[in-house]
Each structure stands twice: as C-alpha cells, then as structure tokens.
C-alpha cells in the first residue's frame, strides 16, 4: 500500500483513485438487484465512521475503504431503475465519468480567461441546451446547484428588472423604500418557489387557483393580475410533481406580459418535454417567458449538483449577479460564468451536462425523455390491472399518482412496498388523499423494469389485503 499514516504528502493519486474506482465499481454493480432501502441508521453509520477526530489518520486508500464500509449500508439505491421517489434521476456513465474528471481538474470556474477549457465546455453545453429546449439563442445559461437555485436566479433577476422598469435600482438601494413587488405562483407550485420568494425578499407568493390536474388557471391569473398593480413577478410551472401536468404556458405568459410582469418557468423536470417531438406540445409557448429553471440531475440523469438557470435578457441577468474586483481578470468579450450565477468559486458543474448531451445527441435526448414518459404510461396501464388501484392523474408525462383505496390502505401498501425493497415510490398527499407517487426519471427504467414494478406492487397489495 502506498502512503503511510505519518505523512499525508506520501499519498498518491494512483493509490486513492484506484481504491475509489474499485469501491465505486462495487457500489454500482448492485444498481439493478440489490435492495433499495438503506440497512443502517444515521447513528449506526456514525458509530462505524468513528466520532472522535484522530490525532493522525491512515493512508488515503484506507480512509476511502473505511468510508465506504461505514457509509454504504446507509445509502439508498436512488440509481435503481425501480426507484420512483420524489423526482430523482440516475447517473449516465458518460456524465459520471465527466464528473470525476471535473473533480480531478479542480478548476475554479468563475472566469473565462482563467479556465478556458471548462468554460468552453459549459458554454457549448449551454448553447446545446437552448437549442434542445427551443429557447432563444440569445439567452444566457448559468450552471447552479439545482432547480431551487435556478428559480432563485430567475426570481431575483425578474425582481430587479421589474423594479428597474418602475424606476427603482435594487443593486444600489436594496429593497427597502422601493415599490412593493407582487409575487404570484400557482396553488400547486413546488415548495422551492416559496423559498426563492423568501430569499429574494418578496415573501411567500400570492397563490393563483389551479385546476383538477394542478395547472394554474389562466383566468384566475388574469383576475389576480387585474386585482392589483405595480411591479410583478409570476412563476409558472412546467411539470407538476404529482400529476406531471404543465401550466397553460402560452396563455399565462401572454396574460402576465400584458400586465407588464416578469415570467419565470419552474421546469425542474418538465422543461425536458420540449426536447422530445412527441411531448413538445406540453410546453407550447415556453420560449416566450423571461427566465427558466431546470435540473440536469433529474431527467437528463447527470450526477447531483446540476441545475440550470436561463434568462432571456443577458443584461438583466448580469446586472443582478455580476461581481467585479480589481484582482479578478474579467472577460472583455462575453460575460463570465460568475456573471450568471450567485457563486464566484465553484466546480465546473456544467461539464457533466456537456458529456451527457455529447453522448446522447439530439435524438438520444429525445428518446430518453420520451422513454420516461412511455414507461410512465406503461406503469399506469400495468397498475390499473392491480385490484383496488386508481390512477388519480392524467398521465401526460413522467408522473403517476396512485391511490389504493382509503388513505390507510394506501399508506400500508407504500410501507409493504418499501419493506420488500424492490421498488421505491414516495408517499404524499394530493387532492386531499393519501397517494403513492411514482416519478419515472431513471434512464434505465424500461418495459422489463416496469413489469417487475407492477408485480412488486401487486404483491404488496396482496400482503395488505
Ligand atoms: C425537484 C424540483 C425542484 C427543486 O429542485 P432541486 O434541484 O431539488 O433544487 C423545483 N421544482 C420542481 C417542479 C421540482 O421537481
């Protein structure tokens, strides 16, 4: 073994990365068939990790093998093709490999002139994304941690823009003393929209009524807009976490723009529908918004830490997020990555997005997204053959929302399913009922996995009856 406990400088990358690759290989080999739930609690994991900081540690490879030994029993197999919890993607090999390279290259990706290699890959990935999602070529793309931060970027940029139009400069003056900004979102918005509003100093959104699929009602938006005035930011949704439904983007964007509002679209997983010809109709009108947020770590199946913030008007984004300092060699041609996101120092998290897109190509992305929607439709059809099941939503995209009868039975089926360890779906409440949500978001979920899923659900239902 190379390296010894006495001198950290005797550790080698070959030793550490060789061990890491072997451990990763072992973990990934259980992806399809090992039980999904963790077998250890957080306290048990801490006991094995050891709670006392040592005076000196062992060599790097031994640190890594001890880490994996302690942590693995506490890992949930979110990469399983039968993991349907929340909205969770797996990790395509090309993207995972690129993620390792990003860590190895260890570039602080704030400035084009300093780290041209990774900034080039991110800028190309950004251009490809705009093309695939049908968004304006002139829009700017920032790589953030996830859709929560993407919504934050859109809402802050929108807030500043509508206040600027009202004659108030937030950058110079802050919010205090300025006009109040109205912040509107649908009744069934994602909770992260509320976070974005709070972080942006706009408070909790005023809620606009939704229809039976959870889509914001455009007539209710019109009424809400007419009932007040002043600078306004509206947040729409492409992809409801329970039903998969999409707001009437074309109609709502028109209504909001007539009222002079900024429109952000939260499309954490739904924006990808625009990349599949068979699903694109769900996003009609999308390109007319002012900002968009999505995740690559969901539908695109890139490892975590991969959100995308997009703003149509580059100058608006820069005026909210640019950062200058005498010691930073800012670009003179085009904006720097740090002008497009809240962070200065960050990893080159857009590079795995480039790798995923380069691997799949235009047709591969379309097939990935369509494949998830097809698997969701097949899952809904299969589940309908299980006694007592009702599918509560119109399955238009990747989400299937299921009831097994009364709330107690639904909860019990969920618990049985979880305990059997073959399928994971997340319990929730939708339209005043207990439900199990199945979000089909993994690149490996195919007809065979759907069949295994339906059989596991049938067995869980049988065990509860
Ligand atoms: C997951 C999700 C978010 C939050 O995204 P993070 O990447 O977890 O920050 C926001 N909106 C919707 C619709 C989501 O599904």
Image (spheres, rainbow, N blue to C red):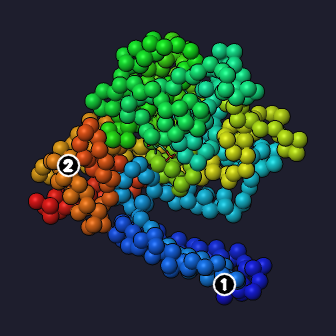
Q: Which mark is residue 407?
A: 2
Left or right: residue 179 versus residue 111 is: left
Farthest residue toward the right?
326
Say which residue appears at 58% left-offset and 48% top-offset: 145
Secondary structure at numbered mark 2:
helix
Left or right: residue 255 versus residue 20 is: left
Can the viewer see residue 353 in this picture?
no
Can the viewer see residue 149 in this picture?
yes
In-front residue for pair 351/150: 150
Secondary structure at numbered mark 1:
loop
In-front residue for pair 197/155: 197
Residue 430 in picture, x, y percent from top left? 29, 40
In-front residue for pair 182/386: 182
Q: Which mark is residue 58?
A: 1
The image shows residue 44, relative to residue 217, as above or below, that is below
Write down the quadrant of residue 251 in the picture.
top left
Say which residue appears at 63% left-offset and 51% top-offset: 349
In-front residue for pair 250/365: 250
Disc 2 C-beta below 8 A from ligand 1: no
Residue 99 in picture, x, y percent from top left? 61, 58
Left or right: residue 355 versus residue 265 is: right
Residue 66 in picture, x, y percent from top left? 56, 80
């Amino acid at each position: 073994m190379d390296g010894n406990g006495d001198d950290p400088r005797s550790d080698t990358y070959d030793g550490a990365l060789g061990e890491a690759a072997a451990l990763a290989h072992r973990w990934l080999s259980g992806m399809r068939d090992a039980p999904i739930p963790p077998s250890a609690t957080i306290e048990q994991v801490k006991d094995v990790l050891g709670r006392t900081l040592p005076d000196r540690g062992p060599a790097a490879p031994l640190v890594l093998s001890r880490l994996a030994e302690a942590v693995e029993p506490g890992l949930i197999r979110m990469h399983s093709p039968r993991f349907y919890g929340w909205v969770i993607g797996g990790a395509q090999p090309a993207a995972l490999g690129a993620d390792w390279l990003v860590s190895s290259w260890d570039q602080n990706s704030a400035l084009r002139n300093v780290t041209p290699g990774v900034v080039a890959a991110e800028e190309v990935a950004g251009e490809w994304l705009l093309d695939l999602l049908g968004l304006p070529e002139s829009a700017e793309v920032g790589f953030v941690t996830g859709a929560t931060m993407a919504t934050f970027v859109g809402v802050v940029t929108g807030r500043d823009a509508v206040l600027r139009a009202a004659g108030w400069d937030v950058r110079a003056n802050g919010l205090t003393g300025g006009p109040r900004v109205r912040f509107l979102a649908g009744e069934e918005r994602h909770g992260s929209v509320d976070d974005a509003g709070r972080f942006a100093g706009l408070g909790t959104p005023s809620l606009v009524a939704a229809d039976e699929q959870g889509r914001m009602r455009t007539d209710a938006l019109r009424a809400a807009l007419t009932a007040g005035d002043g600078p306004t930011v509206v947040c729409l949704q492409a992809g409801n976490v329970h039903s998969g439904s999409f707001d009437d983007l074309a109609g709502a964007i028109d209504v909001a723009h007539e009222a002079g509002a900024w429109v952000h679209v939260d499309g954490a997983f739904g924006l990808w529908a625009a990349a599949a010809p068979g699903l694109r109709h769900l996003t009609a009108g999308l390109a007319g918004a002012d900002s968009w947020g999505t995740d690559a770590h969901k539908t695109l199946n890139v490892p975590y830490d991969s959100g995308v913030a997009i703003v149509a008007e580059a100058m608006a984004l820069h005026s909210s997020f640019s950062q200058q300092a005498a010691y930073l060699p800012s670009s003179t041609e085009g904006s720097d990555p740090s002008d497009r996101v809240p962070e200065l120092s960050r990893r080159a998290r857009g590079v795995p997005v480039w790798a995923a897109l380069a691997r799949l190509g235009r047709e591969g992305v379309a097939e990935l997204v369509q494949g998830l929607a097809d698997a969701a439709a097949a899952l809904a059809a299969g589940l309908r053959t299980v006694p007592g099941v009702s599918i509560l939503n119109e399955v238009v995209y990747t989400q299937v929302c299921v009831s097994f009868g009364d709330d107690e039975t639904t909860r019990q089926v969920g618990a049985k399913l979880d305990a059997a360890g073959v399928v994971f779906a997340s319990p929730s409440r939708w339209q005043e009922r207990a439900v199990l949500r199945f979000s089909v978001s993994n690149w490996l979920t195919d007809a065979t996995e759907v069949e295994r899923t339906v059989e596991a659900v049938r067995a869980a239902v049988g065990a509860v009856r």
